[in-house]
Amino acid sequence: AQKITQTQPGMFVQEKEAVTLDCTYDTSDPSYGLFWYKQPSSGEMIFLIYQGSYDQQNATEGRYSLNFQKARKSANLVISASQLGDSAMYFCAMYRGNNDMRFGAGTRLTVKP
Amino acid sequence: DAGVIQSPRHEVTEMGQEVTLRCKPISGHNSLFWYRQTMMRGLELLIYFNNNVPIDDSGMPEDRFSAKMPNASFSTLKIQPSEPRDSAVYFCASSLAGLAGGKNIQYFGAGTRLSVL
């Protein structure tokens, strides 16, 4: 079965510190994409970062980076220099082609001042 | 650039009533998705369209749910008759499918929070 696992229901981090949100996936397809989305309390889903299965380098977007370990099938999100506005739900997702996108259960991140 | 636009943002209705949710995808995108989000089940894909054609509706819970995409800039999700268990946040998302490497980024609308009393 193809699935996405986020094992941390909730995480706390001190403002200005870095935090890692875990994501593991299971697929036998050689070609796939991995995504992270942020859902603040206002409810919208905001795309953060993308990693392709064939990408050699870890993806980075500003303070967001994706720690992609293909052999371990993990795609952890690293947020550096956390800000209060980073408090939100974070979802990991995997795209396998044919518009098949699967989402994890999410991790609620709380940034403490 | 305008993102995915959903309306209404909130809908409160009584059991048995018909509910219609609307979505305008990002201009130029050729794929459109309807999702439902609940605390119990998380994000579930209900149906998606490619070039206005429904491709996979296996996620639609039952016959009370129907979706249409009459043109590239508009889609509806209808629930008739609505039931309390349909209460959820419904998201519409669009993407430009067919990009190499699986970079099929889905951009979401703000969602419609549906409450069926």
Image (tube, coloured by chain):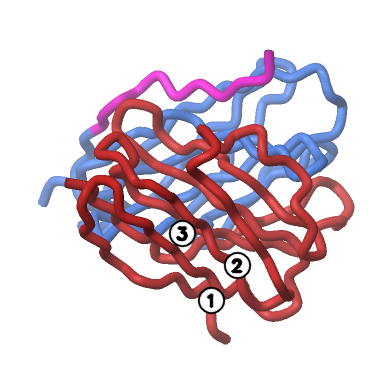
Chain colours: A blue, B red
Residue B112 placement (x, y as % from top left):
35, 60
Is mark 3 in CB contact (under 8 Å) with mark 1?
no
The amino acid type found where label 1 is placed reads Gly
Left/right of residue A88 with respect to residue B81 in the rendered view:
left
What chain does mark 3 sit on?
A: A
Neighbor class of circle 1 (other Cα within 10 Å; few <14, some 14-19, many 20+) is: some
- Residue for point 55% across, 64% down: B76
Quick one: B68 or A11, which is closer to the camera?
A: B68
Dot 3 falls on a residue whose secondary structure is strand
Q: Please state, as top left, top right, bottom left or bottom right, where the N terminus of chain A lies in the image.
A: top right
Neighbor class of circle 2 (other Cα within 10 Å; few <14, some 14-19, many 20+) is: many
Q: Is residue A82 above or below residue B42?
A: below
Residue A97 placement (x, y as % from top left):
81, 39
Q: Is residue B43 above or below residue B7?
A: above
What segment carries the magenta color? A1-11
Q: Which residue is mark 2?
A: B75
The amino acid type found where label 3 is placed reads Ile
Neighbor class of circle 3 (other Cα within 10 Å; few <14, some 14-19, many 20+) is: some
Residue B20 placement (x, y as % from top left):
43, 63
How far is the residue under mark 3 from the one under mark 2?
21 Å
Q: Which mark is residue A46?
A: 3
User: Are labels 3 and 1 assigned to the same chain?
Assistant: no
Left/right of residue A93 with respect to residue B114 in the rendered view:
right
Magenta stretch containing residue A2, yes or no?
yes
Dot 1 falls on a residue whose secondary structure is loop
- Residue for point 41% across, 47% down: A79
Q: Which residue is mark 1?
A: B3
Quick one: B98 or A63, which is closer to the camera?
A: B98
Q: Earlier in the sequence, mark 2 or mark 1?
A: 1
Quadrant in the picture for residue A96 = top right
How far is the residue under mark 3 from the one under mark 1?
11 Å
- Residue for point 29% across, 34% down: B85
